[in-house]
Image (tube, grey):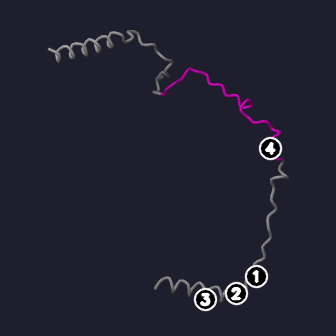
Amino acid sequence: MKKNLIILCTLLLLASALFAQQANQQTTNQPRVNARGVFVDEDIIEIKVRSMAPISGIYKSKSDTFMPSRKYRFILDDKIMKDNSELLLNKWLKESK
């Protein structure tokens, strides 16, 4: 008897929840499909970029952010190339063992 009462209460609760559902769903402004099959949204989206831009006074001027490039002087002659080549070859041979 207790089991039947619990089932009956549960069914009544579920039935009341189903009846409480809204009969007419409110339609949102969904995009429509035109003849070519393209979704067309009729809402106009206006983006105001000026209102999103930060205040110009917080930026540094270009001269404050510019870093001069360093000058490197590479001297390449036969002796340096030979020494570096032998060093690299020896390292490669040791690693390959």
Predominant SS along the magenta part: loop
**Number of other residues with Cα within 10 Å of mark 2, as a class: few under 14, some 14 to 19, many 20 or more:** few
Query: Are circles 2 and 3 on residues that touch, CB within 8 Å?
Result: no
Q: Earlier in the sequence, mark 4 or mark 1?
A: 4
Image location (x, y in percent) of residue 51: 73, 29
Q: Earlier in the sequence, mark 3 or mark 1?
A: 1
Q: CA distance from mark 3 to mark 4?
A: 51 Å
Query: Are circles 1 and 2 on residues that touch, CB within 8 Å?
Result: yes
Tell me the SS state at disc 1: loop
Circle 4 residue: 59
In the image, the segment drawn in magenta is 38-60
Q: Earlier in the sequence, mark 1 or mark 2?
A: 1
Circle 1 residue: 75
| Figure check: 67 above or below 59 | below
Q: Residue at x 54, y 23 (%)?
A: 41
Left or right, 88 with respect to 27, comes to right
Q: CA distance from mark 3 to mark 1?
A: 18 Å
Image location (x, y in percent) of residue 67: 80, 59
| Figure check: 97 above or below 50 | below
| Figure check: 57 above or below 21 | below
Numbered disc in front, either 2 or 4 = 4
**Which quadrant, please, contains the N terminus?**
top left
Left or right, 21 with respect to 73, comes to left
Image location (x, y in percent) of residue 44: 61, 22
Q: Earlier in the sequence, mark 3 or mark 4?
A: 4
Q: CA distance from mark 2 to mark 3?
A: 10 Å
Q: CA distance from mark 1 to mark 2?
A: 8 Å
Residue ranking furthest to the front: 2
